[in-house]
Image (cartoon, rainbow, N blue to C red):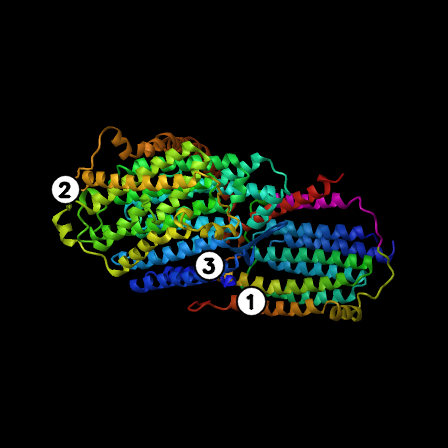
Amino acid sequence: MSVYEILFWFLTVMALSCALGVILSRNPVNSVLFLIATFFAISGHYILMNAQFLAIVNIIVYAGAIMVLFLFVIMLMNLNADTEPQKNRLIQLAGVISGGALFLVVLAALRTSTVNVLEQTSTDIGLIKNLGKTLFTQFVLPFEISSVLFLSAMIGAVVIGKKEEGQTA
Amino acid sequence: MTNLVYLVPLFPLIGFLINGIGWRKMPKSAGGVIGSLAILASFVVSLGIFFEVKASGTTTVVNLFEFISSGKLVIPFAFQVDALSSLFLLIITGIGFLIHVYSTSYMHHDEGMVKYFAYLNLFVFSMLLLVLGANYLIMFIGWEGVGLCSYLLIGFWFKNRDYTNAAKKAFVMNRIGDLGFLVGMLLILFNYGTLSYQEFFGQLSTGQVAATSSMYNWIAICLFIGAMGKSAQIPLYTWLPDAMAGPTPVSALIHAATMVTAGIYMIARSAALYDLAPVAQNLVAVIGLATALLAATIALYQNDIKKVLAYSTVSQLGFMFLALGVGAYTTGIFHVMTHAFFKALLFLGAGSVIHAMSGEQDIKYMGGLRKKLPITYITFLIGVLAISGFPFTSGFVSKDEILLAVYHHNKAYFWVAAVTAVITAIYMFRLLMLTFMGSFRGTEEQKHHLHESPWQMTMPLIILAILSLVGGFVQLPHLFGGHDFLNEFLAKANVPALVVEDPGMEMREYTLFGGTCLGLIIIFIATRKLFAVDSFKGEYGGFKKVLANKWYIDELYDAIIVRPLNALSSAFDRFVERMGIDGIVNGVGKLVRWGSDRVRLLQTGQVGFYIFVMVIGMTLLFAISFFGFSN
Amino acid sequence: MPVQYYLFLSLALFSIGVMGAMMRRNAIIVFMCIELMLNAVNLLLVAFSKMYNDSSAQIMVFFNMVVAAAEVAVGLAVIVMMYRKVHSVDINILNRLKH
């Protein structure tokens, strides 16, 4: 086993177990922490695939910004394991079965597809220089539109979160 | 001038639009003035066109725009200006103008006067389209347009149930005829690929398209069925007498002078076709003759002044078809023209009488009006003389020509037609005597009210009376120093005249002349004795009752057509409509309602459940797309 | 490393996200599961980018992140608002549409 493979399996096991932790832990704060760990594992995969820029952005945006926002909201509402609503067993079972069925169906479908080995040689397409060039030449219009999306999301969040008249916290 | 022909129908259209749009707001007098001026303008243009055509004698087709263009089929919106159409232009706009003027006074008390003028203008517009069209389709547009206006005007006083029923009857009967016309048109289109007169008749004369004689007959018969409906011939004539429910000037214009002659116009226009279709031509003659006789006998015992005139119109139309049927196309057109003069005159005279009698139409209550309505009396007398065929009046000349033409065709037809002409004179004189002679039989109040009509009504009467007197001189028999102006004129439009080489012609002409004079004197004396009376019951027994009840034709139609149809419809309504179709439609509705009542329960509002269903669906879709249809 | 491995990994992560969305009633956890699913897809996109040696897929991931960030901003605002109204984040309470 090369170092590469060791790293791959380690990150894979970490991602899957942390993902299971997200949905199984009763305390929402723990869920958030597990999710952050999952994102780190995914970022590790990105690095293995020479997508260094995305790995960094993933950590900064997801683990850094978004998950902190989640954490912040959970703390604001003072949620913990005791206040956590629980579904009954039957519904949980149904969820597991249907999710598992989805997994199995797609797995079965892709099981026999031709094997395509990812080479371990490093490429530089994932470097910030190349991505930046593509982004600002080929994809400059979607890029600008996404800024409008951000603006509208920001305004939307402010409008929704605003206290209504005559309402006290 | 010929190129300005589009102006002729344009003026009435403008008049219709102004009156039609503003009829609620406009003052009555303005509606009358606009309506009359529009027709006057058309008349002036028509005069110009007429004299130009008379001078040049050419046929001009004015293409306005492309109306239908589909594949090889191209039908332009075109007007054909030739001798025939320009003559009809004059009749329509000329008499139309007089009747418009008459109406300004006659309809003065009616609240819907502006609307009335809008309809009347629309009618003139449609009628002009009918005669101007350069192909059958344009003619058909006008044909339907005049049918619509006829419906609107018969039912003008729509608050009266009987009147609206009469309007419906006219409309439905015309539809039956129109179907025939339509089928004929489609046959022409199918066989010759064109509806244009010039192309169609051109192909007929050169024989480019090999058609059998039976095809000519079928086309001609189909067209004639259309003419039957519009021109009130057996078996579709019963609507015309009922159409007298409309205002009297309408009866004069639409149901006597112009619209009902559309059938004659159509057949005269298609003369080239009918010459090739002997069976159809014979049918036209027989139907015309039968109608003339039947309607004349009915008219003998009618007590409604307008009904008498209506049946006489039917009868005279029969004469025209008879002339067409024996091949004397120009004679038929000639009779259309003279008939337009004297029948419009008679109707307007009747209108004047009705006006004076405050709406009374029953001649039982008239009599002795001669003193009170002198102008009406004299003009009406002239009309009666003309229609009876008093020598040298217009009716004499045209009817004389018809009889002579028929004589050469078939002796039996001639005798029937001659008897009919005698009956015509009898019922017209009876009407005259009962109305104007004897003593007044109405109420005191009516007697007090009697008055001569204003100048707007008497002026058209006088003009029409003069025309009725001298209208025949355009084609006076050679014997009396006349000349066939009309035949020569119409020959330019390819409407053939019947040319007879007959050595006994003069003899017969004298016989007819003498016979007419003698007969009229006898009839005059007899009717004067019988009908210029002080009291008149107007009730009949025996065979007279059959005639007074119009041979029970309406009842017959009712029994053999209307009632079985109604019964069939109600059976369909009950079994097919209610049980079958309604059952299916309502069943579908109920099924959907029942199903959605059940399916609605799926909408729990639980987000978790929605996700669950979504995942299941997604899984199924994957499964189907991966495993379902692969190899 | 065969690309299938990444395929199965991201499929497994996605399925875990689906299960979580169905099993939990806490709106915030459901939201986090959605984020997890988005990341599973991102991972797959990067794998394919590597396989075809094409940077377009990575740009796609970039835009995914943009959308996710915008979505989180609005979504969390909605959840906060809902909490303010009913003092709960239980999605089963959100069944008002039925009535």
Say if mark 3 contacts mark 2, CB within 8 Å.
Answer: no
Pick the front one: B8 or C8? B8
Say if mark 2 contacts mark 1, CB within 8 Å.
Answer: no
The location of residue B512, given as percent across then percent down, is 36, 40
Q: Amino acid at mark 1?
A: Ala
Q: Are marks 3 and 2 on the same chain?
A: yes
Q: Amino acid at mark 3?
A: Phe
Quarter of the rendering containing residue C61: bottom right
Q: Which residue is mark 3?
A: B50
Pick the front one: A129 or B390? B390
Q: Outermost residue toward the left?
A: B444
Q: In front of the other: label 2 or label 1?
A: 2
Q: Which residue is mark 1?
A: A157
Q: Outermost residue toward the top?
A: B542
Specify whether residue B223 is painted magenta: no
Q: Which residue is mark 2?
A: B534
- State whether residue B234 appears in this view: no
Q: Is residue B302 left or right of residue B484?
A: left
Q: Main secondary structure of the magenta part?
A: helix
| Residue count near mark 2 (Cα–Cα under 10 Å), binned few <14, some 14–19, many ≥20 | some
Q: Secondary structure at mark 2?
A: loop
